[in-house]
Image (spheres, grey):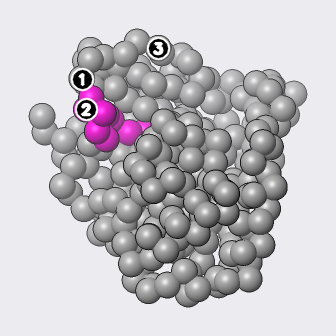
Amino acid sequence: MDLESLCNEAIVLIREVGNFISNERVKFSKESIESKGKHNYVTYVDTKAEELLVEGLQQILPSSGFITEEGTASVRNEIYNWVIDPLDGTTNFIHGSPPYAISVALMEKEEVVLGVVYEISGSECFYSYRNSGAFLNGSAIHVSKVESVSESLIATGFPYDNFDRLEPFMRSLKHFFVHTHGVRRLGSAATDLAYVACGRYDAFYEYNLNAWDVAAGAFVVKQAGGMAGDFSGGENYIFGREIVASNKRIFNEFQHKVGQIMNP
């Protein structure tokens, strides 16, 4: 399989769907918001964008399967499956506050082999495919070179509907407030990971995430020279609903501290 050509075709499609989302943002009305649960929203834009992505990706890679946030396609393939978040950062989109992104990954059995994160408001496309390195709008990107967590800028996401681990999460925030250069929260996990990949952030962690939130971004981080894992020191971050990611120099220290606080 020619992953480079596949990635390029996917990027063209993803940018087209990004243009659709941008155009809809101009005329978007909050009256069209639906709730999937407490503080968890979906709009016709999410659903239509996912339909466009599924339709286009089916043409690019016939007979492939899909793992999608909005459930517009549920057919799984034994080998190739696209993992899609059509609008990561829906709450930001609703309020007209960037960032919000499209996240698309291709899995070959259990391995991610291609990932694209398109941050729509900034027209920034982060992407990689197996053994390619990582890129932002055609230019090579790399994770940061900080040597310790104390030197790092940390990104995270706030829980919005699962507060079971809120107390340890608040302790983790307190620790990183005090012992790093700061903590940032954008409201789009895919964008957070893309920013780790290009060195804007040094590390990222969050719990209660889904595969479509992290599959593409974590892959781009790894292709950019970084690492990703779960809170417990393992690698179950795509389907395990928790993730840490950073450059290789601070990964062990960062993963250990997050796990120590979040899994006491």
Q: Residue at x 52, y 67 (%)?
A: 256
Q: Nearer the viewer, residue 22 or 110?
A: 110
Find the distance from the CA under tag 3 to the CA under tag 2: 17 Å
As displayed, is residue 78 above or below residue 100?
A: above
> Magenta segment, which residues?
98-112
Q: Secondary structure at mark 2?
A: strand
User: Which mark sits nearer the N-terminus, 3 or 2?
Assistant: 3
Report the disc number at residue 176.
none
Picture coordinates of residue 67, whole percent (x, y): 45, 25
Picture coordinates of residue 161, whole percent (x, y): 79, 38
As displayed, is residue 238 above or below residue 169?
A: above
Q: Disc 1 vs disc 2: Cβ atoms closer than 8 Å? A: yes
Q: Residue at x 81, y 55 (%)?
A: 167
Q: Which residue is mark 3?
A: 74
Picture coordinates of residue 241, whole percent (x, y): 57, 41
Q: Is residue 5 left or right of residue 193?
A: left
Crowd class of label 2 (few under 14; some 14 to 19; many from 20; radius 10 Å)? some
Q: Which residue is mark 2?
A: 108
Residue type, numbered disc 3 = Ser
Q: Quadrant of residue 224?
A: bottom left
Q: Which residue is mark 1?
A: 79
Crowd class of label 1 (few under 14; some 14 to 19; many from 20; radius 10 Å)? few
Residue 204 appears in view: yes
Task: Report if residue 109 lies within the magenta region.
Answer: yes
Q: Secondary structure at mark 1?
A: loop
Q: Quadrant of residue 88?
A: top right
Nearest-to-viewer mark from 1 and 3? 1
